[in-house]
Image: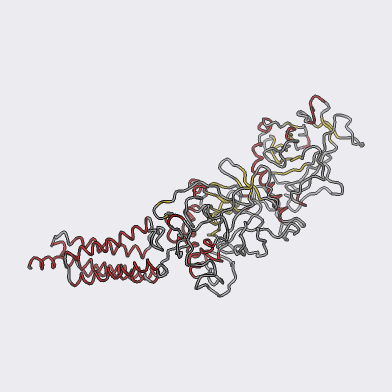
């Protein structure tokens, strides 16, 4: 009896400390029960742990014993192990814990208190009486209280939001890690700009903006309805979208049909993106991390895509954002937005699981009209398809069926989830777009049909080093403008491989001997009647000018030619009033028949102009193939200008030779 009493006296200080820590952990758990009420099983677990930790602590203070110490070790140690599991792997059979969560202040404090209680209880089994008696309850109780109170306060703001929880950039499905894949992305429009984005797994009743995973990867119908149908939806109408400035805070409140949970998740996503995305502020750091430009800098914004992040199941994680968006100013790049891209199984922009994330605040959209061409360091977007789904030559229509959404970290007049504007803005399914300021935009991102006219916009001179903007010409439809800009963009991308005249020569081009005019044309005669048309990989003619600084030929334009037999009545409508085709019916070429076999005069050169009767006194005339220039340097008459002078060529009867002063370098 005396020995038992001595043991109890020796253990009393240590168990008292363990009891204080256990009670504090129980109090924090009690405060969190209501936050998990939507997950019945999880809430019941919180109740059980609360009852145990507080109950055990009170008994340990009243009657310390070896057996009670063992119970405390098992209970509090088990609670800590359970918490650790939820941070690392998730627990698939408990609603609300299917996916791993990053540690937050409240749950971390609770776990530390529980672990401390278990460890201190374990010390009583060591039976080092002097050490046990040296423990003092008062300072430990004070420390526990100093942690418990702020943990309870901060716990009121705790959420299972992926935007909060995925700061570490790690997300796991029950029982297995997601491995980064390598799938292709939908990209960006040269004419209108923008490219691909985000993914959510539904998990029972849904609890996170970014953690909606379910064991096995299946999507389960949850308890929460899509945007506007969930209980508690905000009914006060408010203008949306509204201007957004991170420096002035986040205002996404009061939007009709948006639930409190959707608003919270959307705000969490904005905040975590603001916090973590700047790690890629320098494009060089982004490239080291695996991001590659899709070649759309000409639009004014440039998208970098990490193809390794497209199949990794990470959802709305700014550290693993599928795409980064940079504002372009010459050689300067400023990070302005993340573009989150959905997993492959999401092929619809109006998928109800995606709608749960932010409701009407966010418009998920796809890009099914983007044209891609190969590049040295990855695929490049070179334009948008027309209504017949035709792409610029040398490119293909592919990808773009995965939903995406922007999250801006820079001010934007259309809000933090704004898409870009114009013909290439993407398609949003059957929902009303809420990510563009101009609500008159059509469903496919255009500004009306082919019969509309461009809005009155202050025109910009054509400068290949800056975003291509051919707006402001009356009578030009959005699709005509897009096609014209597309042709310029792909020419800028592909033509420079012929910058060296030796490279042109090696590819079969020969000068026609007109350098004295100031513009020297190299023609590949075998390309004129081949299968390629308006293709900068196979341009029929290249135009060089003498560089004023070096005197060496400088590549300045492509001259695309249609095949023999076609006339100006057969030319394709590229850009309406922006583009004008012409012919040459007054040039006489070399008279050596041996150098002109079967209409392909490999060594033909211009030797004279026709006389008043349209005949060649020297040499011979060639077929009057329609042709058009695309300049890759500024030109006083715009990017499609013909040449000047008596050899400039002839336009269609009834037309006047056009000079696009609206976009000319003058």
* Left or right: 264, with 399 as reference point: left
Which residue occupies the extreme right position in the image? Answer: 613
Quarter occupied by the N terminus: bottom left
Residue 146 appears in view: no
* Left or right: 116, with 311 as reference point: left
* Left or right: 219, with 515 as reference point: left
Q: Is residue 174 above or below residue 148?
A: above
Question: In the rendered picture of this protein, how many numbered marks are placed on residues?
Answer: 0
Which sits in the foreground, 78 or 554? 78
Which sits in the foreground, 643 or 640? 640
Which residue occupies the extreme bottom position in the image? Answer: 236
Q: Position of residue 580 (x, y in %)?
A: 78, 47
Q: Is residue 427 above or below residue 496?
A: below
Which sits in the foreground, 367 or 556? 367
Which sits in the foreground, 279 or 118? 118
Q: Position of residue 554 (x, y in %)?
A: 69, 37
Q: Is residue 321 above or below residue 209?
A: above
Q: Position of residue 226 (x, y in %)?
A: 53, 66
Name the image colouring. secondary structure
The residue at the point 33 percent across, 64 percent down is: 109
- Residue 147, image quadrant: bottom left
């Amino acid at each position: 009896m005396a020995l038992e009493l001595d043991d109890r006296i020796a253990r009393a200080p240590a168990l008292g400390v363990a009891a204080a820590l256990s009670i504090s952990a129980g109090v924090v758990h009690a405060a969190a029960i209501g936050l998990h009420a939507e997950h019945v099983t999880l809430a019941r677990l919180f109740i059980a742990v609360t009852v145990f930790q507080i109950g055990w602590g009170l008994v340990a203070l009243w009657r310390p014993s070896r057996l009670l110490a063992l119970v405390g070790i098992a209970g509090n140690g088990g609670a800590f192990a359970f918490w650790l599991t939820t941070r690392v792997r998730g627990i698939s059979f408990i609603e609300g814990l299917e996916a791993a969560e990053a540690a937050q202040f409240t749950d971390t404090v609770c776990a530390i208190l529980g672990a401390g209680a278990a460890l201190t209880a374990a010390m009583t089994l060591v039976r080092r009486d002097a050490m046990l008696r040296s423990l003092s309850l008062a300072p430990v109780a004070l420390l526990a209280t100093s942690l418990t109170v702020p943990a309870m306060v901060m716990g009121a703001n705790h959420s299972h939001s992926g935007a909060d929880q995925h700061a570490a950039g790690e997300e796991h499905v029950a029982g297995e890690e997601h491995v980064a894949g390598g799938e292709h992305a939908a990209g960006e429009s040269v004419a209108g700009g923008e490219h691909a984005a985000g993914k959510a797994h539904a998990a029972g009743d849904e609890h996170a903006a970014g953690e909606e995973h379910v064991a096995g990867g299946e999507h389960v119908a949850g308890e929460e309805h899509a945007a506007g149908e969930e209980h508690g939806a905000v009914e006060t109408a408010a203008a949306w979208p509204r201007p957004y400035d991170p420096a002035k805070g986040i205002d996404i409140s009061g939007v009709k049909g948006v639930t409190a949970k959707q608003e919270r998740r959307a705000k969490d996503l904005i905040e975590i993106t603001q916090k973590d995305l700047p790690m890629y502020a320098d494009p060089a750091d982004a490239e080291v991390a695996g991001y590659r430009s899709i070649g759309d800098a000409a639009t004014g914004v440039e998208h970098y895509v990490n193809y390794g992040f497209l199949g990794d199941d990470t959802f709305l994680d700014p550290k693993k954002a599928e795409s980064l968006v940079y504002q372009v100013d010459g050689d300067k790049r400023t990070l302005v937005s993340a573009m989150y891209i959905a997993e492959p199984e999401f092929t619809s922009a109006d998928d109800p699981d995606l709608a749960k994330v932010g409701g009407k605040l966010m418009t998920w959209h796809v890009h099914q009209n983007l044209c891609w061409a190969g590049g040295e360091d990855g695929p490049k977007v070179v334009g948008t398809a027309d209504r017949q789904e035709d792409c610029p030559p040398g490119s293909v229509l592919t990808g773009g069926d995965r939903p995406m959404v922007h999250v801006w970290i820079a001010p934007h007049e259309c809000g933090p989830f704004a898409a870009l504007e114009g013909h290439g803005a993407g398609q949003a399914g059957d929902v009303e777009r809420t990510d563009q300021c101009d609500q008159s935009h059509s469903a496919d991102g255009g500004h009306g049909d082919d019969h509309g006219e461009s809005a009155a916009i202050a025109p910009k001179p054509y400068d290949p080093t800056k975003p291509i903007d051919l707006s402001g010409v009356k009578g030009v439809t959005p699709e005509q403008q897009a096609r014209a800009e597309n042709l310029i963009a792909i020419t800028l991308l592909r033509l420079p491989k012929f910058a060296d005249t030796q490279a042109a020569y090696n590819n079969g081009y020969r000068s026609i001997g007109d350098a004295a005019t100031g513009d020297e044309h190299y023609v590949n005669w075998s390309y004129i009647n081949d299968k390629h048309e308006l293709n900068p990989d196979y341009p029929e003619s290249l135009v060089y000018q003498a560089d004023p600084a070096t005197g060496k030929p400088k590549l300045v334009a492509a001259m695309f030619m249609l095949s023999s037999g076609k006339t100006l009545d057969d030319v394709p409508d590229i850009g309406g009033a922006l583009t004008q085709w012409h012919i040459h019916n007054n040039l006489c070429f070399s008279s050596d028949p041996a150098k002109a076999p079967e209409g392909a005069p490999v060594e033909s050169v211009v030797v004279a102009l026709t006389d008043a009767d349209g005949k060649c006194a020297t040499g011979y005339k060639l077929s009057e193939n329609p042709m058009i220039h695309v300049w890759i340097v500024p030109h006083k008459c715009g990017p499609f200008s013909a040449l000047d002078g008596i050899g400039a060529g002839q336009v269609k009867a009834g037309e006047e030779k056009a000079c696009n002063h609206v976009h000319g370098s003058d």
